[in-house]
Image (cartoon, helix red, strand yellow):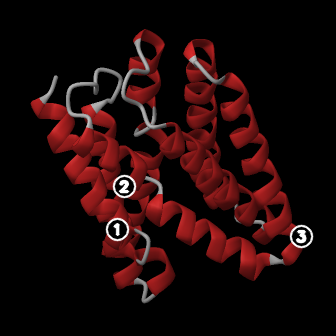
Amino acid sequence: MSVAAVVGALGVLLNQVFIWPQVRRAVTTVEGVAALTVLGGLLARTAWTVFGASLGDVPLILGNVTVATGFLVILLLMLRHARRPLALLAGAAGVGAIVLAAALAGELVLGWMAVVSAAVVNLPQMLRALTDRERLAGVSVLTYVLIAAASTCWLIYGVLVDEPLISAPHLLLLPTALITAAVASRNH
């Protein structure tokens, strides 16, 4: 088995588990969880799932549908406590409309939308963690550590298989996950 295959398999495994500590924490509290990160995560992982379906790529589908489901559960938990539930519902509807429009535009547009949305998904949570350090009770440190580990795998995997599009989102995703984990850890 090649190094690339091992790193890729580890990335898939980490993708399957990284969202669930955040889901578990959100059952108790969603305080400090950035709605834009949840909506962005739902957008990115739904786009990757649909992109995988368009390619007939079962591992890509399986590697992302679990995470999309986790983000959907967090969104539902946030709706339960939301001061403005209509804004969250509108955001969720927007996610569906964007993915549908990108899918109708073709695989290239859908693929690039998945890459870009995955790259920026942690930015709202990182910014919230940096600007509102006292309200991070609902942010799972373990989730962000696992995201960093998965991003490291995908960054390395993309280099090993000479696919820059696989590595590209992780150049931003990795540091934002590490910063969010560090700030949240200091405040728990």
Residue sitting farthest toward the top: 28
- Residue 48's spot in the image, x, y percent? 65, 60
Mark number displayed over residue 10:
2
- Residue 1's spot in the image, x, y percent? 37, 70
Do the residues bearing badges 1 and 3 touch, measured as CB atoms within 8 Å?
A: no
User: Does residue 27 appear in the picture of this structure?
Assistant: yes
Residue 146: quarter of image: top left
Report helix, strand or loop for mark 3: helix
- Residue 160's spot in the image, x, y percent? 35, 83
Task: Compare marks 1 and 2 and give the one earlier in the sequence.
Answer: 2
Mark number displayed over residue 133:
none
Tag in front: 2 or 3: 3
Report helix, strand or loop for mark 1: helix
Residue matched to label 3: 104
Q: Residue at x 31, y 30 (%)?
A: 140
Disc 1 crowd rating (10 Å Cα; few below 14, some 14-19, many 20+) is: some
Disc 2 crowd rating (10 Å Cα; few below 14, some 14-19, many 20+) is: some
Q: Amino acid at mark 2?
A: Leu
Q: Residue at x 66, y 33 (%)?
A: 88
Residue matched to label 1: 172
- The alpha-carbon separation of the residues under discs 2 and 3 comes to 32 Å
